[in-house]
């Protein structure tokens, strides 16, 4: 699979995620083993204290980690998140929230990926969350090819 | 705090969560140490394969676990999720998705809570995810009283 | 596989674990999907404050969860821990420490198992830790048949 | 607290851990925010397949992460592991097993630390496990000052 191919594949897959559209999340960077997803805080994604909901932070971090895994796997495989764990380090608030996913170790069946999530404010970045995820490679399963 | 008080407090807090409204999530049950949150799958919360996004499953599970923790804590405290870990066991698809949170152990600083998430289909329940969360008790912090 | 067979298989495997001997851990109960491992605190397994080391608590909890998974899988398969997460809820101190593992959901490739760890003191049990583990089924891999 | 002070404090604390002696683990490096603990595989720390037990890998990783946290905290505080999560990526086998802990974010109440564990063989390092841990700062609690 050439670089161009995995990028097209990931961009097509991302565009099919209704939930990313709902969040207002955009795919900012697609490189082999490294993905960046960003969004701007708005009331529809907040929790009761006016911060972006931890579930939203988890969702973009999980997606960034998942696409990072997909970017290093063979073209005929898909990935499903088996589990993820996220530490929420500071309130998610700011001009933009950015999740950066990367692959730690790609395996035949399981791939370990991580994502750091940053809040951007006045040109400053602050680490607000860290996710570790186990991605399961799936092959030939109906409907899971990306 | 009487039973009535914690229920009112949790319902008020839930109503303030813009993200729960966005998801179409509803608070189905509020009891001391046990909370149920449900939603109906719709395109705006799906991932690329047409299943409810793992981040959405994580969000309602985290909220159910967090409110379960809040329901057992003193009235002048709030909770923040320090970390959560979720195992996604089967695709989130069906007529309804229901997260049931409960407290495993309440502590002064940290409370361990869990949530099981079920897919409901034709009267059948299927376990699709399991979350474990560490909730941090906060007191006297501006804006975090629920 | 009959009940007798999985019990023999698990007892044989446990006996081969040099680390369980080092810890002084014993296999107390072997039932389908439920395993109990116990030990008595002694200086050689303690951390700096005189409590049983969190890594020891994790080890018996992981083993209890892993054998619980093995007890429900076909006879020609083995299990490897892909990941575990443990919440340490109270200091591990007392007359005995007991880990009780159980299967939450058995899958073809991955099995979710849990373990609760209790400290026993004067006839009282206290929950001191909770573990969630993802076990990977392995088949036909040299050296991994239990 | 000067550099020398935190190093002395950590070396003294490590020496008090009976379990580290049992494992044959040694403190290889003590720097601010970075700790290295190593051991040589031997039968007394193995699981049934002849690999170092996942619980042992978890124990040295947890200790490396915990001391990394301690090295950046004020002198009158101690740390307790609230929870850790470890992904076991490859069998722990080789001439030496080395855990390298570091602080990701230090907070007043909670500190996020990580550890990577490597197997060393013939001059080659292989990543075999990755741990994320939440450390709780404790102050003025009897018996927990390191």
Image (cartoon, coloured by chain):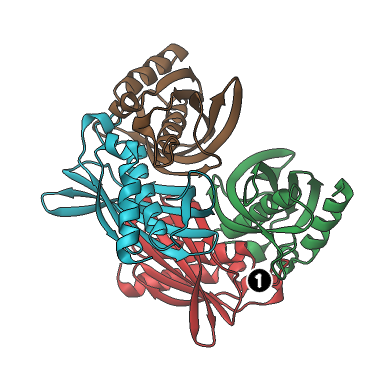
Chain colours: A brown, B cyan, C red, D green
Query: Foreground: A47 or A132?
Result: A47
Residue on which the image places disc 1: C51
Which residue is painted at 80% across and 50% down in the image?
A: D28
Count of numbered labels shown in the rendering: 1
Left/right placement of residue D68 relative to residue C36 reads: right
Which residue is painted at 40% across and 52% down in the image?
A: B66
* Residue D58 x, y percent position in the rendering: 60, 55
Chain letter of mark 1 equals C
Which residue is painted at 50% across and 26% down in the image?
A: A98
Quarter containing the C terminus of chain C = bottom left
Asked whether residue A56 is in view, the answer is yes
* Residue C144 x, y percent position in the rendering: 48, 55
Left/right placement of residue A52 relative to residue D99 reads: left
Which residue is painted at 67% across and 49% down in the image?
A: D94
Q: Residues within 10 Å of mark 1 (few under 14, many from 20)?
A: some
* Residue D119 x, y percent position in the rendering: 66, 45
Left/right placement of residue C138 relative to residue D95 reads: left
Q: Is residue A109 above or below residue C137?
A: above
Q: Is residue A13 above or below residue D112?
A: above
The secondary element bearing badge 1 is classed as loop
């Amino acid at each position: 699979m050439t670089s161009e191919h995995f990028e097209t594949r990931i961009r097509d897959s991302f565009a099919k995620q209704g939930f990313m559209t709902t969040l207002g999340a955009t795919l900012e960077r697609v490189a082999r083993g490294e993905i960046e997803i960003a969004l701007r805080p708005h009331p529809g994604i907040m929790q009761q204290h006016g911060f972006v909901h931890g579930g939203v932070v988890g969702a973009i971090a999980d997606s960034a980690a998942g696409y990072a895994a997909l970017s290093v796997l063979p073209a005929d495989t898909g990935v499903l998140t088996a589990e993820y764990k996220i530490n929420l380090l500071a309130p998610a608030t700011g001009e933009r929230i950015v999740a950066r996913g990367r692959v730690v170790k790609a395996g035949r069946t399981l791939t370990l990926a991580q994502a750091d999530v940053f809040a951007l404010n006045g040109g400053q970045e602050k680490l607000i969350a860290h996710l570790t995820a186990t991605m399961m490679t799936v092959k030939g399963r109906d409907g899971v090819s990306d």
